[in-house]
Amino acid sequence: MKDKRWIVSGLVVFLLIVLFPFWYNRGRAVPPPEVKLTEKAKAEKECVLARDYMKAEHMQILDLWRETVVREGNRIYTNPKGREFVMSLSNTCLDCHSNKAEFCDKCHNYASVRPYCWDCHIENPKEAR
Amino acid sequence: MDIRRRRILQLLGLSAAALTVKPVYDALAADPAAGRPRVGPGREQLKAKQWAMVIDTRRFASEADVEPLIEACHRIHNVPHFELKRWEIKWIWATEYKHAFSGTSSDRFLADAVEKRPFLVLCNQCENPPCVRACPTKATFKREDGIVMMDFHRCIGCRFCMAACPFGARSFNYTDPRPYLKHTNKLFPTRMKGVVEKCSFCAERLAEGKRPACVEAAGGKIAFGDLYDPASEAHQWVRKNYTLRRKVNLGTEPAVYYIV
């Protein structure tokens, strides 16, 4: 037990370092991101499905779309209201949400999600060809 | 006492049966599809049992005749151009008879015209594709209309398919292709480092009711259609002309035919 001094002070230093971020950021919450809608998206009022569903579950839809288009060759999605959409990330989603940096990226960065969609899918189809 | 007990049991049974009426009625009366999203093909989708291409090589005399077709394909599919031969990516390209049809016929002495002619080669969309069997993730698969399709999302870059393909129709992305694209077609995705790619008979154009880009650019020198539909142009060309296919002895049943 003659090393008690060292062990205790080591533990104290360790705890200080580990707890420093919590102490440093105490009482502060990072404000949740505010996504910006383009004029076109605002005019549409509703996305493919209801807004709350899209907010929470858009990745499910995208996964379904990917699977259906690539593997089954079906490209048209009809939503419960009977409206048809071509299932395409770059050409349908980003047609309205053409502000990827202000829309997609904002939440993804906040939640530290790094989807690799953009490795292949082109970010904004509306740019000059 | 006995009669009362029986009566209670009867009533219990009747009320239990009555409870099931509403769920059964709801299930039978309601249209299950109503209020649910649906997926389906587009109205213009072209359909076939086995898509096939017939190339009339007699009408391609020089490089200048094939170049626009290759360019049309590579341009709309964002196929990069690499100076480095090892990194080369190609969906459709031109080669000589001796490379395209080695071992196919008595090619010791060849007609001059045939010897010098460029032969367009591309993925043969085989009816019995060895690449599909080699793929461990089912990233490459055979569609119902005969197209051998790539799902780039699933490709892990193992390149078994490249080893399995006897036609060299597949290319591997050794590096991120984006910096090497001169033009980008914003309507079609690019690829990323580490995936294999190849011709898909323009599946994305067939969905819109258009024929493949190379067929369109060929202006009637290539027939495209359902091999098993007697009314299709491809079927008729194969019936009227003597055709060759590449490496038929391997049994992959290529769906690209050549009129020589």
Image: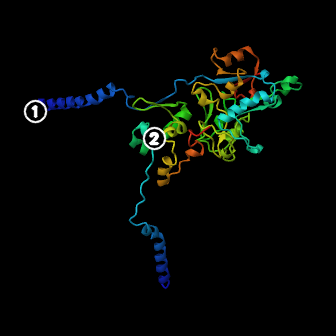
The kind of residue on which mark 2 rests is Glu
Q: Secondary structure at mark 2?
A: helix
State which quarter of the image contains the N terminus of chain B: top left
The residue indicated by pointer 1 is B1
- Mark 2 against mark 1, which lies toward the viewer? 2
Q: Is residue B116 visible?
A: yes
Give how far across and how far down residue A124 sits, in percent. 56, 41
Residue at 43% in and 42% down: A54
Is B202 placed left or right of A80 in the picture? right
Question: Which residue corresponds to the image point at 43% horizontal and 51% vertical from the top-left?
Answer: A34
Residue B11 x/y as whole percent: 17, 30
- Which residue bears the numbered disc 2? A39
Relative side of B41 to B65, left or right: left
Amino acid beneath label 1:
Met
From mark 2 to mark 1, how far is it between C-alphas? 79 Å
Picture quarter containing residue B31?
top left
Q: Quadrant of residue B260?
A: top right
Q: From the viewer's side, name the closer residue of A14 and B166.
A: A14
Q: Nearer the viewer, residue B180 or B89?
A: B180
Find numbered disc 1 in the image and state the secondary structure of the residue it sits on.
loop
Q: Chain of mark 2?
A: A
Above/below status of B37 relative to A107: above
Rendering quarter of residue A28: bottom left
| Image disc number at residue A22 | none
Q: Is residue B260 visible?
A: no
